[in-house]
Amino acid sequence: MRHPDTWLKVRPDGLWCEPGGFFIDPVNPVERAVITHAHADHARPGHGAVLASAETLAIMEVRMGAGRAGRTQQALPYGEVLTLGGVRVWLQPAGHVLGSAQVAMEWDGSRAVVSGDYKRVPDPTCLPFEPIPCDVFVTEATFGLPVFRHPPPADEVARLLASVSLFPERTHVVGCYALGKCQRLIRLIREAGWDGPLYLHGALLPVCRAYEALGIPLGDLRPATVAAKAELAGAIVLAPPSAIADRWARRLADPVVCLASGWMRVRQRAKAKGVELPLVISDHCDWDELCRTLVDVDAPEVWVTHGREEALIHAAEAQGRRGRPLRLVGYGDEEEGEDAPPAESPNVAADATA
Ligand SMILES: [Zn+2]
Ligand SMILES: [Zn+2]
């Protein structure tokens, strides 16, 4: 048996599975890429062969434009094993956004699992994370500090709807990133009993349409740009985080500025962004979920990337595991609003001038 650190390596382009001849979520164009999910920092354009879930490939195509999501594309259904250069590779749900996957790899008697981004809280828009026992677990740590505890998302949505009934003449404008958070928020609002129209900034519409085409119904969605100001009094408008404190939001009826993000746990952040109603809703694990996942996958070794590496490594060591910071570069944090919408979307252009 050879330990995964002899065959899964950190390269400037990202994590490289040497015998398999592929990168996972490479930050530069490569010959062969396995993509965990369609967020912009994980799924980049210009690769040769791209392997991902069918949903991820479909969303990449919508966001990047036809033909830019890889010269050739192969959809791999969850749980189906493919052999690349002798490496057994399969995808397992990550619970992060629609199509998101962990990448499991087995070679020469050892198994490594790369989580991509993930969460453990149920999400009505995607399949739940499935723990895979492994020798090395590569985990993100976006919210890898004990201070980060995400409350139940239904409670946060209940606070939003309570505010809407308290201020029936004001428009609630909710900042949420375009892929995943937006659609999850819509479904959570629907589950809370709101079946009237929801108004959307144009940058959010293409991915919503893609979700619906992939079997996630979102109900009555209308473009906010064409709605009359009077129609928007008492309405809920969803917009990218960059738009909520912008000129774009100022034309709404006395807006209540809301933002749905794990970072809203930090009061100063909400204040700095001019957020009146912070909603702590995250598509990443909170601290307890991260620690619980290390127990569930029970890997003797944990590689940590994407955020607060030190605290989670310390927690892994306290559980009797070896911890290692990966220090991969080039990955952003979509909850910070870096999950930029595709520039070529005509809806975005329309909104930019509105
Ligand atoms: Zn990420
Ligand atoms: Zn992500």
Image: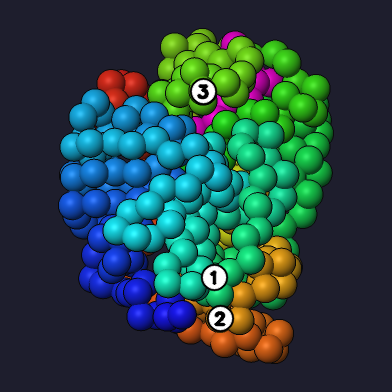
Which image quadrant: the C terminus? top left
Is there any visible trace of residue 147 in the rendered image? no
Residue 242: image location, x then y, percent: 42, 43
Residue assigned mark 1: 137
Q: Which residues are magenta?
A: 231-241
Q: Which residue is mark 3?
A: 214
Of mark 3 and mark 1, the one earlier in the sequence is 1
Crowdedness of circle 3 by 10 Å Cα count: few (<14), some, many (20+)?
A: some
Q: Marks 2 and 1: CB-CB under 8 Å?
A: yes
Q: Please name the residue shown 41% across and 48% down the image.
A: 82
Dot 2 crowding, Cα within 10 Å, few <14, some 14–19, many 20+: many
Number of numbered callouts drawn: 3
Element type at mark 3? loop
Q: Nearer the viewer, mark 2 or mark 3?
A: 2
Q: Which residue is mark 2?
A: 301
x, y percent for residue 278: 66, 49
Identity of the residue drawn at 68% across and 89% down? 320
For residue 263, which quarter of the picture? bottom right
Closest to the observer, 43 or 114? 114
